[in-house]
Image (cartoon, helix red, strand yellow):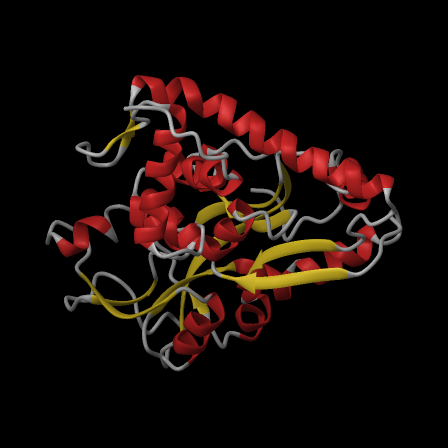
């Protein structure tokens, strides 16, 4: 392959990094918010510019060639360095972006983010704040596209997500737990509970949900084996959504068992509008995490990271 004499396009490098992260042309194109044919052309143009194949298209998932693996850290450093250079140049002209930009998963945008931010504001002076609330995969995409400086989401130490795999800096801000809940029956116990002969009606998270990824990993006997007919407790997934608030609404309507963040159902558990489904091992501890961009950020964002780099009094619930 001969080297292309055309100028290098920064988007080609960013597309290559997205492909190396996802191992899939379709997912990488979606993360970069461009059509797959255009994305594929960018990768081919980069290979022509370098002069060698960087991607083994015959592998599934897509793998980098030996040349691609050697090129990857250099490309990552180049993109990060250019981003930092742009910030410094804007600072020199007094045009640096003053706002803080967060992507926050739906449940945390209501239960955690407002009071956490309120506590931070006593320790940090900042300008405007932009917040985008969405499901986990969309928040990860916003980070990959550099449209936000921070992502606030749930995580689990034994279930790495895309931001962990890409080694974005992270701080654990607090703890919570996914608890299985149901409306009560006439005796006060859960209306939907295992061991009653019929399949257990389950309200599940979609593939786009980080909470769903954690549950499927930690409770394989319930979720993965169910579709193959090997579950210890037969289940029937009667409803699926990526939004915990929607699953909570369906649980309150008596439609089945939902694993919800404990912080989201504190009032309902206290009033017994919802009751725990007390199966050993079905409670899943989770962490509240904040990730940041790897490259240098504007001074206000860097100042925020310095503030939260140490202990922050923002736990959702008691540590367990």
Image coordinates of residue 207 in percent, x first then y, are 33, 56
Task: Give the left or right position of residue 242, taking residue 95 as reference.
Answer: left
**In this view, 103 is above or below 64:** below
Residue at screen point 33% across, 74% down: 191
**Residue 231 seen in render:** yes
Q: Which of these two is toward me, 192 or 84?
A: 84
Q: Which of these two is toward me, 224 or 106?
A: 106
Residue at screen point 34% across, 49% down: 27
Image coordinates of residue 194 in percent, x first then y, are 25, 61
Q: Which of these two is toward me, 182 or 278?
A: 182
**Residue 280 seen in render:** no
Task: Give the left or right position of residue 44, taking residue 84 as reference.
Answer: left
**In this view, 117 is above or below 12:** below
Residue at screen point 54% across, 73% down: 268
Q: Quadrant of the C terminus?
A: top right
**In this view, 118 is above or below 248:** above
Residue at screen point 18% across, 55% down: 226
Image coordinates of residue 283 in percent, x first then y, are 42, 50
Q: Quadrant of the N terminus?
A: top left
**Residue 319: which quarter of the image?**
top right
**Residue 88: which quarter of the image?**
top right
Q: Which of these two is toward me, 306 or 225?
A: 306
Image coordinates of residue 21 in percent, x first then y, are 40, 36
Q: Residue furthest front?
A: 5
């Amino acid at each position: 392959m001969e080297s292309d004499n055309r100028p290098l396009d920064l988007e080609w490098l960013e597309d290559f990094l997205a492909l190396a992260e996802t191992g899939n042309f379709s997912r990488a194109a979606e993360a970069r918010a461009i059509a797959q044919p255009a994305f594929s052309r960018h990768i081919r143009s980069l290979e022509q510019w370098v002069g060698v194949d960087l991607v083994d298209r015959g592998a599934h998932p897509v793998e980098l060639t030996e040349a691609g693996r050697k090129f990857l850290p250099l490309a990552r450093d180049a993109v990060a360095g250019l981003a930092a250079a742009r910030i410094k140049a804007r600072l020199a002209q007094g045009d640096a972006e003053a706002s803080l930009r967060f992507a926050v998963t739906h449940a945390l945008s209501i239960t955690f983010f407002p009071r956490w931010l309120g506590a931070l504001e006593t320790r940090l002076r900042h300008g405007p704040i932009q917040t985008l609330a969405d499901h986990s995969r969309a928040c990860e995409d916003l980070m990959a596209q550099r449209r936000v400086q921070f992502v606030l989401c749930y995580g689990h130490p034994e279930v790495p997500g895309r931001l962990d795999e890409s080694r974005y800096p992270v701080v654990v801000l607090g703890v919570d737990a996914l608890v299985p809940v149901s409306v009560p029956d006439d005796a006060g116990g859960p209306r939907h509970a295992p061991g009653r002969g019929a399949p257990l009606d389950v309200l599940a998270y979609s593939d786009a949900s980080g909470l769903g990824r954690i549950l499927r990993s930690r409770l394989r006997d319930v979720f993965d084996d169910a579709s193959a007919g090997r579950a210890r407790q037969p289940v029937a997934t009667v409803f699926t959504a990526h939004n915990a608030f929607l699953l909570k609404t369906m649980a309150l309507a008596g439609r089945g068992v939902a694993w919800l963040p404990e912080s989201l159902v504190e009032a309902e558990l206290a009033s017994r509008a919802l009751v725990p489904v007390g199966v050993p091992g079905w409670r899943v501890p989770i962490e509240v995490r904040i990730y940041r961009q790897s490259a240098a950020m504007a001074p206000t964002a860097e100042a925020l990271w310095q503030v939260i780099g140490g202990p922050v009094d923002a736990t959702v619930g008691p540590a367990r």
